[in-house]
Image (tube, rainbow, N blue to C red):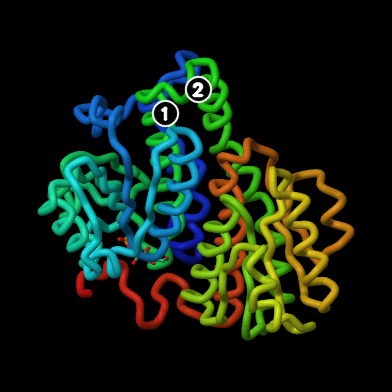
Amino acid sequence: EKGGYEHFMLKEIFEQPRSIRDCMRGRMYPELGKVQLGGIKEFANKLKNIDRIIIVACGTSWHAGLVGEYLIEDYARIPVEVEYASEFRYRNPIITEKDVVIAISQSGETADTMAAIEMAKDKGATIFGICNVAGASIPRISDAGVYTHAGPEIGVASTKAFTAQVTVLTLIAFYMAQQRGTLGTAELTELLTALDEIPDKVSLALESNELIKYIATEIKDATNCLFLGRGCGFPVALEGALKLKEISYIHAEGYPAAEMKHGPIALIDEQMPVIFIATKNSSYEKVISNIQEVKARKGIVIAIVTKGDRKVKDMVDYVIEIPDANETFLPLLATIPLQLLSYHIAVMRGCNVDQPRNLAKSVTVE
Ligand code: F6R
C-alpha cells in the first residue's frame, strides 16, 4: 500500500504530479480560456455581486486559504478574509447573506471548521466547501463545493491535500475572475496553459530529493528553524515551518521575510537554519536583502531558488532549485522541497513521520 516507499508521507509527496493533475481534470480548458466548476455552477450569478469572501480553515488548510486570499483578491478583485475556524466561531463576526464562506478541510470532519460553517449558515451566508474526503460532513453541510480529488491521504502531515487545495483555490480565483470579467479569455488562456504545465514542473522539483536529503543531514540537529518568504512565499513559509515542527519536533516558525527585523532577527546566530523562498518573482530583490541580513549574522541559509539562479547561490549555504513558473503558481512548486526537507529531517531524527506524537488525522473535537 506504500507503493515501495518507506512511508506514506513520502509516497504522498511523490504522488503530487498526479494528484494535482487529477484535481484540474475536466475543470479547465486552456485553449478556450475557460474554467468550469460544476460544484459551484449554480452560484455563478451570485458571484458577480458578492462584496466579500471569508475563508475558514485550520492548520495546513488555513495556509492554503492564505494562498487563496492572494489569488482571489489579485484576479477576481473580491476582498477576502482568512480566519482560523476556531477563532471565527467564537468572536461574533459580522456575516450577512451577501457573504460567501469558503471552508477548506482535507478530512471534511474538523470540529472547529464545521462549527464555523454552522454559524455562518445561520446568519445566511452561502457556504462553499473545499474537501478531499468525498461524502464527509463538511461537503454535506455546505451549499456547494469543489472536491480536491487528491486521493486518500494517510500520512498525518498533509502534503498532497495541501497542493490540491491550492490548485482548487487557483481555479476558483480564475472562475470568479471569469464570472466577474476581471480576466479576459486571452489572459485566462495564458494562465491556464501555464497551470497545465505545473504537474510536470512538480515532477522536476521532486528530482532534488537526493540533494535535499543531503541538506537534511546538515541541519537535522538544529533546535530552531526559521522559514521566510514574501507574497505567496509567505504562506509557503508558514506551511514549511508547520511541516517541520509537526513531524521532526524541531521548533520552527514561518514569517513574512520583512517582519524578521521586527523581532525574530534576534534569534539568528551560527546555529540557526533559515529557509528562504527566494525565487525570481516580484519580491526577489527584497528577499535578497533579507538574506543579506541573515548572512551578516552568520545564520545558515537554505534558499529555494528558480532554476539557474546564480545571485542567491553565491550568497547562501545551500540552494534548492525549482522550475521557473508564473508567480501565481509559486506555492505549488516551492512547497515541494519543504515537504521533502521535513520528511528527511524527521526520518533522520528517528521520528514516526506518518504518525507524529499527539496528532490525529482528523480533529473531531475542538
Ligand atoms: C498539518 C495538518 C493539520 C490539518 C488541520 C486541518 O499537516 O494536517 O494542520 O491541516 O488539522 O485538517 P482538515 O484539513 O482535515 O480540516
Distance of mark 1 from mark 2, alpha carbons? 9 Å
Crowding near pointer 2: few (<14 within 10 Å), some, many (20+)?
many
Q: Is residue 52 above or below residue 244?
A: above
**Is residue 124 toward the left or the right of residue 347 in the image?**
left
Residue for badge 2: 188
Which residue appears at 45% of the width and 58% of the height?
63
Q: Residue furthest right?
A: 314
Q: Nearer the viewer, residue 261 or 11?
A: 261
Q: Position of residue 285 (x, y in %)?
A: 78, 51
Q: Position of residue 221 (x, y in %)?
A: 67, 84
Give the residue type that dot 1 points to: Ala
Q: Residue beneath label 1, please?
A: 177
Please give left or right for residue 295 compared with residue 109 in the image.
right
Q: Quadrant of residue 76?
A: top left
> Residue furthest toward the left?
122
Residue type at numbered disc 2: Leu
Along the horizontal axis of the image, is 314 left or right of 293? right
Question: In which quadrant is the C terminus drawn?
Answer: bottom left
Q: Is residue 132 left or right of residue 317?
A: left
Q: Is residue 110 visible?
A: no
